[in-house]
Amino acid sequence: LIDLSGSTREALAMQSFVRYFRVSTKGQAASGLGLEAQERDVQLYLDNYLNDEHEVIATFTEVDSGGKESRAELALAIDVCKRNKATLIVSKVDRLSRDIHHLSGLMKDKKLDFRVASLPSADKNMLYFYGIMAEMERDFISTRTKAALAARSPTVGLTCASAMRNFILQE
């Protein structure tokens, strides 16, 4: 039995992670509920699915749409991963991206390794599938939001003539 102590042991076995959390709205960020759930999922992965010692070298939190490719905190997180040969970890695929083209680009980046806490055994094909589902959900969210806004305002989506008719009838 060889006793590896101190930094030699850590250098041989230590796996580095960068955590990335994202919510879409300031209200979600203020409530903290979505972020707490993401933190819990990532911690469960780190505690239960790794064979090696690990360290979290950075954590990034962002309030922005998952449909956008250009997000400042995500870019910083990826840069830290690449510079430190660390693994990016997110709770779910949709926290990383709701755009399959963007996700595909991240998957093809040979200098970036990432893990999805809620899919500990996912292979590339599964990640593509979940990425497609995340993009589809983004489209559903957009449709539901537009319908809710239209329901709140009686003139949204009406032609000028029908809006005028509704106004006259209310008089």
Image (spheres, helix red, strand yellow):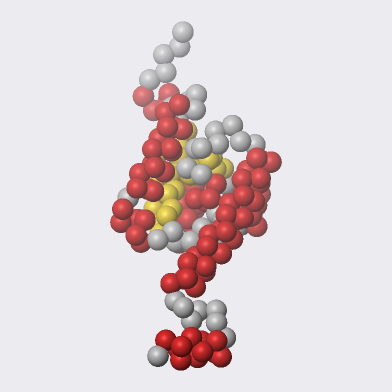
* Along the line of sight, the residue nearer the viewer: 108 or 41: 41
Residue at 50%, 24% (x, y): give it.
51
Q: Image height check: is 151 above or below 88?
A: below
Residue at 42%, 28% (x, y): give it.
47
The image quarter containing residue 127 is: top right
Residue at 43%, 23% (x, y): give it.
9
Residue 156: percent from the left, percent from the top? 50, 79
Residue 22: percent from the left, percent from the top? 43, 53
The image quarter containing residue 97 is: bottom right
Residue 37: percent from the left, percent from the top? 39, 42
Residue at 45%, 26% (x, y): give it.
48
- Tally the numbered discs: 0
Q: Image height check: is 44 above or below 106?
A: above
* Along the line of sight, the residue nearer the viewer: 27 or 104: 27
In the image: residue 12, left or right of residue 100 = left
Q: Is residue 51 visible?
A: yes
Image quarter where the C terminus lies is: bottom left
